[in-house]
Amino acid sequence: MNGEVYSDFMTAQQKFDLTEKFEGFEIRNFLPCVVADVVVSGNVSTAGNQGFRPLFNYISSNQISMTAPVLEEEIAPEQWRVSFVMPHDTKFEELPVPEGSQVTLRELPSHRAAVLRFSGRTTQKSVLDHEAQLLALLHTHGFVATGKARVARFDPPWKPPFARHNEVIIPIL
């Protein structure tokens, strides 16, 4: 299967191949991509909002299309990397250098990950609960996590929480 499996989105999404589905989670092979990052302090509940503006300013001032999701990954206690995935097939060397900004660019290689979808707000408790749930499912099915969890937010903050699409993503072998 190909990556655009959620047809309710108008915004382009990070590309992946769906390889396996289990009760409660799925396994994906994410394709290589380029991301724009900012590092912010705080918790998962506030990181996305803090990181959004500089990332949005970078893509809008350079006429780069918005994609989904916005990714958040804790890189140190109370420190988060918030990332926008650049449109598919964007080449690192073709992107404008984000000068005078806290935005940096990096290439992500292809990788295999387990994904658990959930709705609601991405509070610290909610994210930790869903991460624990996915880790338990991975253990039950014999998968081994190879990295830290990241959170993927697909919807704007004004969308009702019950209708939001969020994911916890954990790299696996």
Image (cartoon, rainbow, N blue to C red):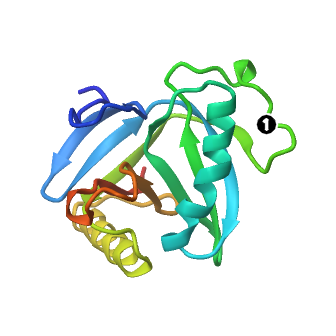
Percent x, y of residue 24: 17, 59
Question: Residue 82 location, x and y as percent?
Answer: 59, 55
Furthest toward the left, the residue is 23
Q: Is residue 146 above or below residue 135?
A: above
Q: 41 or 75, which lies in front?
A: 41
Query: How many labels, in total?
Result: 1
Whether residue 171 appears in this view of the structure is no
Looking at the image, residue 7 sits to the left or right of residue 124; the answer is: left
Three-letter code, disc 1 = Pro
Q: Residue furthest front?
A: 158
Give the x, y percent position of residue 56: 60, 43
**Which quadrant would residue 122 be assigned to in this image?**
bottom left
Q: Position of residue 130 (x, y in %)?
A: 31, 71
The answer to whether residue 52 is visible is: yes
User: Image quarter for residue 20?
Assistant: top left
Q: Looking at the picture, does residue 154 appear above or below residue 134? A: above
Residue at the farthest right position: 100
Image quadrant in which you'd find residue 90: top right
Q: Is residue 152 left or right of residue 78?
A: left
Name the residue at 41% across, 43% down. 112
The residue identified by callout 1 is: 98
Circle 1: element type: loop
- The correct choice, above or below, for 147 with respect to 4 in the image is below
Viewport quadrant of the N terminus = top left
Q: Residue at x 33, y 41 (%)?
A: 28
Q: Horizontal placement of 139 versus 83: left or right?
A: left
Q: Is residue 167 left or right of residue 150?
A: left
Q: Residue at (16%, 52%) from the top-left corner?
A: 22
Taking depth in this image into account, of 84 and 5 the one nearest to the observer is 84
